[in-house]
Every structure is written in structure tokens, then in C-alpha cells.
Image: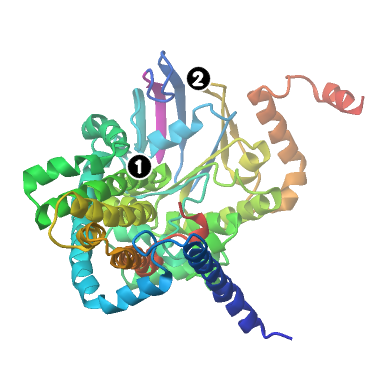
Amino acid sequence: MINPMVARLITRIGYPLFGLVVILGAWVLACWLGNLPTVVLPTPDKVFHAFIARFDLLMSEGWVTVKETLYGFLLAIVIGIPLAVAIANSRPLNLMFYPLLIALQSVPKVALAPIILVWLGTGMESKLAIVWLVAFFPIIVDTVAGLRSTPRELLELADSLRASPMQVFLKVQFPAALPFVITGAKVAITLAVIGAVIGEFVGASEGLGFLLLSATSQLDTPLAFAALFALSFLGIAAYLLVELAEKLAEPWLPPSSQRH
Amino acid sequence: MAFGTIRNVRKVFSAGELISRSREPVVALDDASFDFEQGQLVALLGPSGCGKTTLLRIVAGLISKTSGSVNIGGREVTEPLGDYGFVFQSPSLMPWRSVVDNVLFPMEILKNNNKAARARANELLGLVGLSNFAHARPHQLSGGMQQRVALCRALIHQPKLLLMDEPFGALDELTRLEMNDLLLRIRRETGASVLFVTHSISEAIYLSDKVIVFSRRPARVAREIQIDLPYPRSQRTRFTAAFTEAERIASEALGVLPPGSEAETETGAAS
């Protein structure tokens, strides 16, 4: 009989691992059967080799992309949350800007990247602006939604005790909105990585996006794939960072079954 | 003068204020007047949506009245006075706080969250039989238990007046009966006055010193019924002649029972 712990380990790790093997197998098979040249599709081992051989390069370029992603994301939080509070608490501001925010959310903001580059140049600033732009909307829209979903009874309860606006915000509205803020942050961090890469595509001299472009232009496809993997790891790590923040905020969150 | 005086209170919601697409103003409360003494439990009984909840919110100072006057303990109410307890139909606990921290919420707002408050919170939780759940989260509790926590939260700052808006309306019948007895016990121990909104005739009579029956919207006071059943009451009280008689009067005032002699009613029931 199989120990239940082992059984769980097999389900939790064994199956995903098996899925990965299937995909890798299909990849290798495609390379062999199609007789594809390395420039078109390198075999996994060549990509792995490139990843190891150029690890220092990937790390240094990756670090640039990490900085762009995280700084832009933090900027989106630092600017987005106070603005959301202002919009949620002021009826005129709400009427003026909330419909606009919703409308702008569906605009492909990466399309603005070339213009932002014209304004801010090819350095860090333009990347921060692009990342900020894509991450800002989910954060502000979700935070406003969260603040506005505060149960009326709780606001009345605070009111009946003559709570100050600051007390209402800190003890009722913000905790009630926190699950929404986290949902917004999770969407935002994923978009932030995309924003950083787009910014680097449009015009940059460093970063993983830039490395990807220059590798393909030199027909160094294994390096391009290695950069792609590095980007995926970066994206996953950034997402896990937000999940870690969520774990730390656990005491102030409703049970996960009731979260939005 | 009585502890609480409600005089000719009228509330008209302007067009679109209550229901966003209504084009006409809604008269929620036409003319409500009644008095109550300190320590009395008064039930506001009426059909749902008749404006009794509106009246409760006006008494709490949460919404303004169009005309009339509300005077509680010698103070005219125009804004929240800060020393009421409020219990809503839903428990409305904060899911991010433990049970005891939910109870202590008013003390935090009143900047009075000290050792004595903590002791009182635990004492109240003991009173409602939830001592073992002080550090649980609200979602781990049943609906009735959550409403008991809400009751503790309403009592923590020792309010002189407890406003209850159909607090047991969402509970199952058995839990509701238990909660009725609990409320009577708590009232006895705290001496607080209670205004209790309900649409259950028997609940209104079982609990209160006085039942104010409201008509359909726009609400007016249709009848004031003194309930002379002696306290402490028990579930046996429900099966006394005086209780049934009070139920009959209230049913007539509500219009659910056509006025008539008792003999006629009995034949009606038998056929």
C-alpha cells in the first residue's frame, strides 16, 4: 500500500512533472521529425546549454528588467491607491474620472510605448512609465471597486459611533477593500513584466527584451529561447512575490473561500 | 417627559434617492409619534418595507428627517449621538477581525479600548455563551452565533439605547426563539432601552412592553398596544390567553385579521 503522504506528493508534483516531460518530448520530436535547423527551433538541450553558458549575461540583463518591473509596479501602487481612495470617497471625482478609468482600461496601453519613448528617451524612465501605465489601471479600478463594496451596515455602524473619516478609512474601508487590492496587484504584476519587455522592444540598450531582440537579429536562437525562459522565471517570481505579500496580509483577509 | 419622544416624524425621499429610477418622491414615513420610558423594550411592528427601518435610522441620527422631532434622553437627535448600540438584520461582522476584536470595534472608535473594555467584551461573550469562540473568525460561526456577536458589539460601550433592525429575521425559528430569550435576559442585566423593528407579530409581543403597529407605506402609527404580560417571560408565556389576545389585537391593527367577535373567528377556524 502506498503511504498517503507519498500519494499526495505524486499527485502534487508527479503529474505536473509528467506534463512537462510530455511537452519537452513533443518539442524534441518536432525538432527531429521536422528536421528543423537550430535557427528556427533549437532543441531543449541547446537552449539549456545557452542558458548555462550565458548565465551571467542573462542575470545582468534580467536584473535590469526586474528593476523596471518592480519599480514601475511599486509606482503604480503608490500612486494608484491614494487616487482610488480619492475617487471612491468624492462623488464629483468619482463622476468625473471613474467612467474614464473603466474606458481607458480597455485601451491597449502598450500602443503608447513608442510615444512614451519619444517623450522620455530609451533609458529607465520610459520603461518605468510604460510599466506604471499598464499596472496602474487594474490597481486603481480594483481598489475603487473594493472601497465601494464596503458593506453599508459597517459604514453606518462607524457613523453611529461618530467615527472620524480617518477611522472609517483605516478601520473599515481599507480592510474591506484589501482583498480587491490584492487581486488588482496580482493582475498588475503580470502586466508589469509585459510592460517592461514591450518597453525594451520598442527602444532600449539593456534588459531581457533587448537581449531577446539582439539574439534573434544575430540568429542566436538558443540564446533568444534562454532569454524567454529567464523572462518566464522572472514573471513567476514577481507573481510569487505578490502572493507572499498576500500570505503576510492573511490575518487581515477573509477566508480564501470568500475572497473575490 | 418620557425618555424617548418621537413626534410627527415624516420622511420623504426625493426622486431617485431611494430607488434610482423613481421619478417621484417616496413618502417612507408619513406621521409617526410615540413615547417610551427608560428601560422599556418597544417593538416597531409593520409590514416589510413600511418605513419602520427608516424610522429606526432617523432615531439613530443616521439619516435626516423631513419634519417632526426625535428626542432621546433630553437631546434632540439631528446626527448620531454616539452612545447607541445598533444591531442590523445581517450580523455585519468584519471578516478580517476575530470575534473579540469585532466586539471591541466600538471601543476602538471611541478610543476607549483598554483592559476594562477587553474584560467587558469577554464578559459579554460569556453572557451569550460564546466564551470559547473569542478568537475564532466570524466565518467559523453559525448565523445565530454571528448575530450574538453583533449583539455583544452593540452592547460593549454600555449604550442607554439599543436599536435593533429585524435582528433575528434571517434566523431559523428555533434559533430565533433562543435569541428572543437571550435578548430579554440581556435587557434585564443591562437595563438598556430597546427599539426593536420586526415583522413578526408573536416576536413583537413576546419581547416588548409596548408594540407600535405601523400601517403600510406611507407608514403611520396604526395602533399602540400595551403588553401587560409580566417579566420575566418564558416560552410558556406564548400559550397564555393574554398573549393570544394581544396577537389578535395586533393582527387586527395590521389588517391581516378582519375585525369581528371572537365567536365568529372560532367558527371560521373550525369550518
Q: Quadrant of residue A193?
A: bottom left
What distance separates the C-alpha of mark 1 from that of mark 2?
30 Å
Q: Give me the chain letter of mark 2.
A: B
Where residue A197 appears, as percent x and y from the top left, is 24, 55
Q: Is residue A147 visible?
A: yes
Magenta stretch contains residue A247: no
Decide: few, some or many residues near mark 1? Use Cα within 10 Å; few <14, some 14-19, many ≥20. Answer: some
Amino acid type for the residue under numbered disc 2 = Pro
SS class of the residue under badge 2? loop
Where residue A236 appears, as percent x and y from the top left, is 36, 65
- Most extreme residue toward the top, as rendered? B24
Q: Residue at x 23, y 73 (%)?
A: A59
Magenta stretch contains residue B13: yes
Q: Give the vertical position of A150 relative to A192 (above or below).
A: above
Where residue B55 appears, as percent x and y from the top left, is 44, 32
Q: Residue at x 44, y 19 (%)?
A: B27
Q: Residue at x 9, y 52 (%)?
A: A122
Q: Which residues are magenta?
A: B3-14
